[in-house]
Amino acid sequence: MNNFETHIQGTVPVVVDFFADWCGPCKMMPPILKEVKQKAGDRATVLKMDIDKNRYYADKYGIQSIPTLIIFKNGQIVWRKTGVASASEIMQHLHAHLV
């Protein structure tokens, strides 16, 4: 199992930002994700997944538009959104899954 699969299988929730370098709206996400990481601390992991470099995962999770955010916990998708999301929106959905 690779590192990504190991992360999403764990009990710590993982926020994954599926993005591409050429995507304009995707460029809005880094400061938002930084705020989420600051608020969640060690209780959550935040990862970025470049869909051009990781076609397998883009296909596996049906990423058709970007940015797409997915929260995984115990290998399951517990929340998904396509488009830019605010830190407060992400935290609202993440909160129920924090350990």
Image (tube, rainbow, N blue to C red):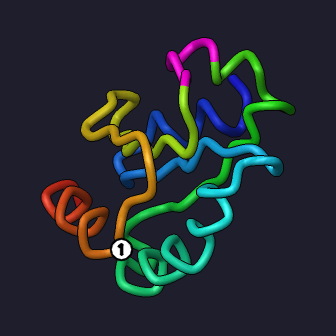
Q: Is residue 66 left or right of residue 10?
A: right
Q: Position of residue 73 (x, y in %)?
A: 34, 41
Is residue 37 or residue 68 the one in the foreground?
68
Instruction: Residue at 44%, 57% (x, y): give it.
Output: 84
User: Mark 1 packing: few (<14 Cα in 10 Å), some, or many (20+)?
Assistant: some
- Name the residue that disc number 1 marks: 87
Q: Is residue 9 magenta?
A: no
Identify the residue at horizontal 82%, vertical 31% (top origin): 52
Q: Which residue is found at the position 25% from the left and 37% from the top? A: 78
Q: Is residue 60 magenta?
A: yes
Residue 50, quarter of picture:
top right
**Residue 99 seen in the current view:** no
Quarter that holds the C terminus: bottom left
Residue 80 visible, this orientation: yes
* Magenta extent: 59-64
Horizontal placement of 29 versus 84: left or right?
A: right
The percent coordinates of residue 61 (x first, y second) are 51, 19
